[in-house]
Image (cartoon, helix red, strand yellow):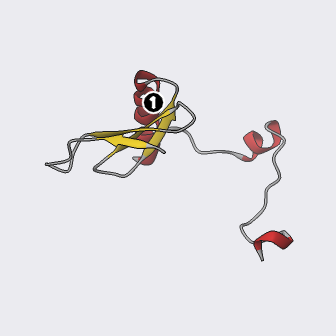
Amino acid sequence: MASATRDASNGEGVEFIHEDDGSITARDIETGVASFGETKAEALRMLAEAIELHEGGGEPVTDEDIEEWDLEETEPGDKELPEFMR
């Protein structure tokens, strides 16, 4: 069972959730953005990156990126759901 630690009295800060698998999730209380890592420090580094992206930082994915990463360009709902999801 996961457990959480936080002090959100002013609606700011970070909540740490200790997951059953040993990883730690860090969630920014103000934005709700979360990320995880094997340690609190790693979870905070990943959270900082996630918040930067959430706020418009980073570079957009291009067609060249999709081709380089060998991904299929599909729209949500293009494919039929598997039987167990119907």
Give the residue type at disc 1. Ala
* Residue nearest the viewer, comparing 82 with 51: 82
Establish if 9 lies above or below 83: above
The reply to whether residue 72 is in sight is: yes
* Residue nearest the viewer, comparing 7 with 79: 7
Establish if 39 lies above or below 11: above
Q: Position of residue 82 (x, y in %)?
A: 84, 68
Q: Position of residue 66 (x, y in %)?
A: 76, 44
Q: Residue at x 82, y 42 (%)?
A: 67
Residue at the disc numbered 1: 43
Q: Position of residue 45 (x, y in %)?
A: 43, 26
| Helix, strand or loop at mark 1 | helix
Q: Is residue 86 left or right of residue 50?
A: right
Mark 1, residues whose alpha carbon is within 10 Å: few (<14), some, or many (≥20)?
many
Q: Residue at x 84, y 41 (%)?
A: 70
Task: Give the residue at the far left of this rendering.
Answer: 10
Task: Give the residue at the far front of this rendering.
Answer: 1
* Residue nearest the viewer, comparing 36 with 64: 36
Q: Is residue 6 left or right of residue 62?
A: left
Q: Residue at x 40, y 33 (%)?
A: 48
The reply to whether residue 57 is in sight is: no
Q: Residue at x 37, y 52 (%)?
A: 32
* Residue nearest the viewer, comparing 85 with 51: 85
Q: Position of residue 13 (x, y in %)?
A: 25, 40
